[in-house]
Image (tube, rainbow, N blue to C red):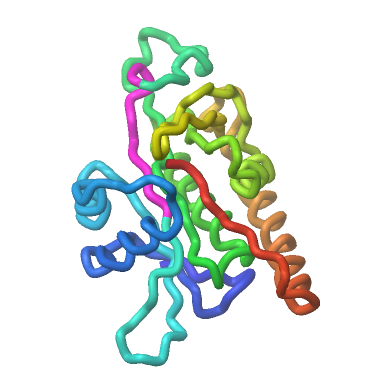
Amino acid sequence: MVPLTCCHSTVSYRPIRPSDLEILEQIHGDIFPIRYESEFFQDVVHGHGIVSWAAVDHSRGDGKGDELIGFVTARVVLATESEIVDLLDYDSAESEWSLVYILTLGVVDKYRNLGIASSLILEVIKYACSIPTCRAVYLHVISYNFPAIHLYKKMSFKCIRKLLGFYLIDGQHYDSYLFVYFVQGCQSRCSPVELVTAIMKYVWSGFQSIAAKLWSNERKVRWMVPM
């Protein structure tokens, strides 16, 4: 597990486990305006085609171990089967090119604005950079989710397209933005310098957020990301 050193000394990161199933379903239900099938959660906790990271807090004193306080789930897809293949300067000879698509990202209420969501995204970026064939990380964000949009822009994701009526929630259509983080020499590079820069940026942001909370408890932001 990788300790979170910038914001909360008792928080670390690890893969999501079968023992997280109940709380994972609960947090998804609390956060997202749509409901995910039980098969999705089974695939997440057992790693069936989905990679995941959990943010966990070890400070809980009830003897039950760490507490899941945030998560990110993603899957590796072939570039040829994605909607952004036209952005990759795709060469037909490169049939093995792949992408990482972020499925869901969330942090429980009391742990928001501490840099945990950005740290989870960095885990995905580092994972993508470790795959020789990977060319980008991408995702969709519902158009009214301004905190998520701001977060991805801060982390050097590029807003590529607006997709009209992409989501259908309770009978109503909502637009979506398509965000992409290019790696491996495409339109942007995933370099150690870039990762360090992003980490330092969010270390500073984390300290600023904590300082702000000491002065005011009125601000509440709902970190919801892609669906």
Q: Residue at x 32, y 67 (%)?
A: 23
Where the N terminus falls, by quadrant?
bottom left
Outermost residue toward the top? Answer: 92
The answer to which image quadrant residue 194 occupies is top right
Nearest to the observer: residue 17 or residue 33: 33
Quadrant hosting residue 85 = top left
Q: Is residue 14 left or right of residue 89?
A: left
Which residue shows up at 49% across the image and 34% down it?
A: 140
With respect to residue 62, does 26 lie above or below?
above
Residue 80 is one of the magenta-drawn residues: yes
Say if 162 sits above or below 10 in the image: above
Can residue 193 be seen by looking at this rendering? no
Q: Residue furthest right?
A: 215
* Residue at screen point 38% across, 49% down: 73
- Inspect this view and state whether residue 69 appears: yes
In depth, the one of 199 and 153 nearer the eye is 153
Q: Give the percent coordinates (x, y) of residue 57.
A: 45, 76
Q: On the rendered image, what quadrant is the C terminus found in?
A: top left
Tally of numbered discs: 0
Q: Principal SS element in the magenta part?
A: strand
- Give the magenta part as a residue range: 72-81
- With respect to residue 179, does 22 lie above or below? below
Report the residue that reaches farthest toward the front: 171
Place of residue 84 in the rendered image (x, y in percent of width and height, measured from the top left) = 47, 20
Where is residue 126 shown, x and y percent of the image? 48, 47
Q: Is residue 160 above or below residue 126?
A: above
Closer-to-camera residue (195/52): 52
Whether residue 24 appears in magenta in the rendering, the answer is: no
User: Residue at point 48% right, 35% down?
Assistant: 139
